[in-house]
Amino acid sequence: MNIALIGSGGREHALCQKILKSKEVGKVFCIPGNAGTSKIATNINIDFLNFKLLLSTIKKNKISLVIVGPEEPLVRGIVDFLEKNKIKVFGPNKYASQLEGSKAFMKNLCKENKIPTANFKVCKKKSDVLEFLRNSQIPVVVKADGLAAGKGVTICQSKNEVLKISNEIFLGKFKSSRKLVLEEFLDGEEASYFLIVDKKNFSFFGSAQDHKKVGEKETGPNTGGMGAYSPAPIIKKKIEKKIIKKIIIPTLTSLKKRGHPFTGFLYAGLMIKNNEPYLIEYNIRMGDPECQVIIPRLKNDLIKLINLALKNKLDKTKIKWKKEKCMTIVLCSKGYPGKYSKEKIIKNLEKIKLNKHSMIFHAGTKILNKKLVSNGGRVLNIASSGGNFFTIRKNIIKIIKKINWNNGFFRKDIGWRVI
Ligand code: AMP
Ligand code: GLY
């Protein structure tokens, strides 16, 4: 079976490596992929948001299964489009994708089903904001309703800041929506909980914690993620039961009742406060870089699993995990998440010998004039697995020092909570 994998990040490189280990796989095409995927699969450099072009590429290459990495094509309805054209695709449809594509949709679904989440108000105009502020305490969290490439959330320390940020969103700062959600601030420890879901079943698909802030000690602006580790020790059995009972089941049941069951990977971003889980956000895909620490721990054949999910038979298998822990540190371009240069040569990568516990996943990389160069803010993910996070991190940092890329930086304190 030929497979297309949509996306170009570290997540997709990790998925691509895993897919290639499957017994059910013929050729793998990465659309568009990166320098890492080009070494192990075939990259096709087209705009995957051009669904018609994507369809003809799929047909030309006799692709019979499409796996979608990032959220944007899902939110824009890639699944509905491909299914209408009789192409097998793994991911949620456009309706269910609103769990990530619209904060207002997600929060209203929570309210309707009594799912624990921060108190909130969906706002369309200034008077809505003033009304929420009258009854709330600072800090207040302002969230753009639609997709905002990780830039849509601001934790505001004054009411004036709330008004300023809200006004920018009302005026169209984000193309995806002019609505916003105001939320009370939740204090606690964040963790991510993943599931693979079909129309009838769901299975646990790993837990992780990531570091969103660019600077050590959780300082500076938010990023797509500077590093992650799996499993997340804070998700103990008792808390997991609550997550499933109070958050996951009501969400999936509600979508089913509305006639739009969720299928695909579901990522619940949680805040754990006094041993109680609160839903902060849903993502309708694997996380990046969380995927890079979850996939190396998965024992099952991923394509077998996805094919079972497409037949709504996830209950026919047991998902098994390796005991080892896994961590990844992201090597970024200097300047990220602000302005940074691209096409900087990365010289030493081929020379590095990795043991079987370590992996380098490419993210923002490409080949230019036969040389490996950077092509984004998050450039490489160095991952390693083992018995304890302290040794794992030491190994990763050793590898990064060998890469010795002058144009990059990374956080040395990934996993501080567990080390
Ligand atoms: P989101 O895009 O909703 O995940 O928000 C991005 C980040 O903002 C989260 O990972 C949290 O660190 C933070 N955040 C979002 N909502 C809240 C909240 N209600 N209370 C505290 N922190 C929040
Ligand atoms: N690492 C956060 C995300 O994938 O949304």
Image: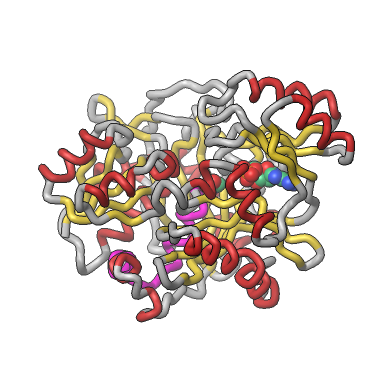
Query: Residue at coordinates 56% horizontally, 26% vertically from top-left?
Result: 174
Q: Tell whether 360 sits left or right of 119.
A: left
Residue 226 versus residue 194 in the image, above or below: above
Task: Find residue 228 and report its horizontal and vertical position in percent.
Answer: 57, 53
Q: How is the image coloured?
A: secondary structure
Snapshot quadrant of residue 182: top right
Magenta region, mostly helix, strand or loop? helix
Q: Tell whether 343 sits left or right of 291.
A: left
Viewer-closest of 409 and 38: 38
In the rendered view of the protein, which quadrant contains the C terminus? bottom right
Task: Specify the quarter for ligand 1.
Answer: top right
Residue 231 versus residue 123 in the image, above or below: below
Task: Find residue 246 and report its horizontal and vertical position in percent.
Answer: 66, 68
Snapshot quadrant of residue 336: top right
Residue 301 located within the stretch drawn in magenta: yes
Query: Residue at coordinates 57% horizontally, 43% vertically from top-left?
Result: 225
Task: Find residue 256 and report its horizontal and vertical position in percent.
Answer: 47, 63
Note whether residue 412 is visible.
no
Q: Tell whether 148 sits left or right of 306.
A: right
* Residue at the extreme top: 171
Query: Residue at coordinates 58% horizontally, 57% vertically from top-left?
Result: 268
Viewer-closest of 405 and 373: 373
Residue 297 versus residue 178 in the image, above or below: below
How many callouts does the rendering have?
A: 0
Residue 157 located within the stretch drawn in magenta: no
* Magenta extent: 288-306
Task: Find residue 383 and report its horizontal and vertical position in percent.
Answer: 47, 54
Q: Tell whether 52 sits left or right of 236.
A: left
Viewer-closest of 342 and 59: 59
